Amino acid sequence: MPAFAHRTAVMFQHCDPAGIVFYPRYFEMINAVVEVFFGTAIAWPFHRMHVVERVGVPMGRIEAEFPAASRLGDELDWSLTVARVGGASADLLLRAACGGETRVTARGTVVLVDLDRMKSRRWPDDRRAALEHYAEDVA
């Protein structure tokens, strides 16, 4: 299945005084990629989720590796695939590369949460199907 693709420019706000991405900023970028993914690929924008339907998809777990540095002015090409769709969660695999060189990989689990009750809830069938469209066999 296809990976979702998104491009992020490394901006001054992402960098430390050495001009390289300060690693916590990658987590902000990851959050942005996930938000764009849900809005674009899943057709479920965060405004609709949070304000209208009162659900959210917080990250319940995340781990990351940073094999090479990114610098101010780099363009990061992100890919997002869905490794698993559970009852109320989904495991995501994200990768950012610049010029073919991997800069960061992350595996995270988002959980669909009822924001008023602060309890997980099952994916609606149409959203599950949309997530499964981006599923890939990931080791």
Image: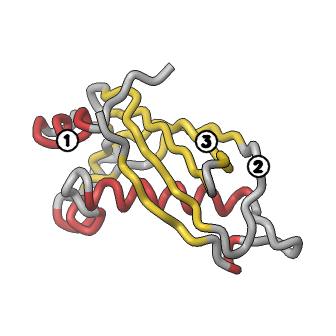
Q: Please, which residue is most extreme toward the right here?
A: 18
Secondary structure state at the residue bearing disc 2: loop
The quadrant in which residue 85 appears is top left
Q: Amino acid at mark 1?
A: Ala
Image point (75%, 43%), residue name: 67
Secondary structure of the residue carrying tag 3 is: strand
Q: What residue sits 36% from the left and 28% below the top?
A: 136
Residue under numbered circle 3: 105
Residue annotated with mark 2: 68
Residue at left offset 77%, top offset 56%: 69
Q: Is residue 64 above or below residue 78?
A: above
Marks 1 and 3 in Cβ contact (< 8 Å): no
Q: Residues within 10 Å of mark 2 (few under 14, many from 20)?
A: few
Res. 130 mark: 1
Q: CA distance from mark 1 to mark 3?
A: 23 Å
Marking on residue 83:
none
Given the current orientation, which residue lies at the most extreme left position? 126
User: Element at badge 1?
Assistant: helix
Residue type (three-letter) at the residue carrying disc 3? Thr
Q: Is residue 26 above or below residue 3?
A: below
**Residue 111, image x and y in percent?**
37, 39
Among numbered discs 3 and 2, the one appearing first in the sequence:
2
- Quick check: marks 3 and 2 in contact, CB under 8 Å? no
Is the Cβ of the residue at disc 2 closer than 8 Å to that at disc 1? no
Question: Dot 1, crowdedness within 10 Å: few (<14), some or many (≥20)?
Answer: some
Compare marks 1 and 3 and give the one earlier in the sequence.
3
